[in-house]
């Protein structure tokens, strides 16, 4: 079993839709969590950290459920420019563990 | 401000050849990392360096060596390339383990 798992998608949604990504992690020692965005053939870039209380950054909301070892990312009012692969990350000690990513295509 | 730079951008090697991937950052970060990314596998940590003069193995270190030459530079060496090392290699740096900035990647093909 992979340490961090994500639905690979692709998720094809129309502009303006709300889309949710889920991620599960198996290492209960994981302490910190992040969402990264990766455009096609580009490097990953930090989208947002995930806090226990949940956090929001504009149209993006991230939530963490430690009991279920589950992380989510919600994108509201999706834009064409949101098309990318979204990578979930769980950190234990010095080790960042990336999920395989979920691909999103926002369609006009 | 260039951020994290990697050279080369593309490379084709024959099985058994050696090469060094170069990485440099100009953000005065303590931590540097090397990852490989394969389809369906996500990014996997090869080696990291928490500070100048230290290096540690990540999840997939076999077949690789690293050198933290100074605070700016962290190189990855393949001594005897194998087709299983065909991948996209990303270098990253960060002020701490909680924040990483990635370079543009090196696409390596081993035939």
Image (cartoon, coloured by chain):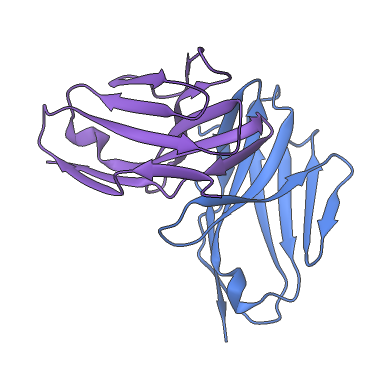
Chain colours: A blue, B purple
As drawn, B42 above or below B77: below
> Which is nearer the eye, B8 or A55?
B8
List the single residue furthest toward the top: B53
Q: Which quadrant of the figure has residue B5? A: top left
Q: Residue at x 40, y 24 (%)?
A: B60
As drawn, A60 above or below A100: below
In the rendered structure, the answer to whether residue B56 lies left or right of residue A49 reads left
Q: Which quadrant of the figure has residue A102? A: bottom right
Q: How many marks?
A: 0
Image x and y of residue B14, in percent: 10, 36
Image x and y of residue B10, in percent: 26, 49
Q: Residue at x 48, y 51 (%)?
A: A43
Q: Residue at x 39, y 19 (%)?
A: B67
List the single residue furthest toward the bottom: A108
Image x and y of residue A26, in percent: 63, 30
Image x and y of residue A21, in percent: 66, 57
Report whether residue B88 is seen: yes
In the rendered structure, the answer to whether residue A98 lies left or right of residue B103 reads right
As drawn, B43 above or below B2: above
Report whether residue B37 is seen: no
Q: Residue at x 54, y 46 (%)?
A: B3
Q: Quadrant of the C terminus of chain A?
A: bottom right
> Which is nearer the eye, A58 or A65?
A58
């Amino acid at each position: 079993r992979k340490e961090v798992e994500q639905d690979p998608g692709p998720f094809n949604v129309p502009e303006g839709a709300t889309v949710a990504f889920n991620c599960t992690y198996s290492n209960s020692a994981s302490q910190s969590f992040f969402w990264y965005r990766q455009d096609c053939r580009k490097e990953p870039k930090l989208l947002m950290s995930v806090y226990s209380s949940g956090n929001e950054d504009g149209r993006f909301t991230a939530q963490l459920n430690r009991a279920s070892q589950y992380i989510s990312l919600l994108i509201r009012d999706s834009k064409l420019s949101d098309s990318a692969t979204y990578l979930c990350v769980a950190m234990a000690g010095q080790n960042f563990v990336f999920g395989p990513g979920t691909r999103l295509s926002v369609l006009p | 401000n260039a951020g994290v730079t990697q050279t080369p951008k593309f490379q084709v090697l024959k099985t058994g050849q050696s090469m060094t991937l170069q990485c440099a950052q100009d953000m005065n970060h303590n931590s540097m990392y090397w990852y490989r990314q394969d389809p369906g596998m996500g990014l996997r940590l090869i080696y990291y360096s928490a500070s100048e003069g230290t290096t540690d193995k990540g999840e997939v270190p076999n077949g690789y060596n690293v050198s933290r030459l100074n605070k700016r530079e962290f190189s990855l060496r393949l001594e005897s390339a194998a087709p299983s090392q065909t991948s996209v290699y990303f270098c990253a740096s960060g002020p701490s383990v909680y924040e990483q900035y990635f370079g543009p990647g090196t696409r390596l093909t081993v035939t």
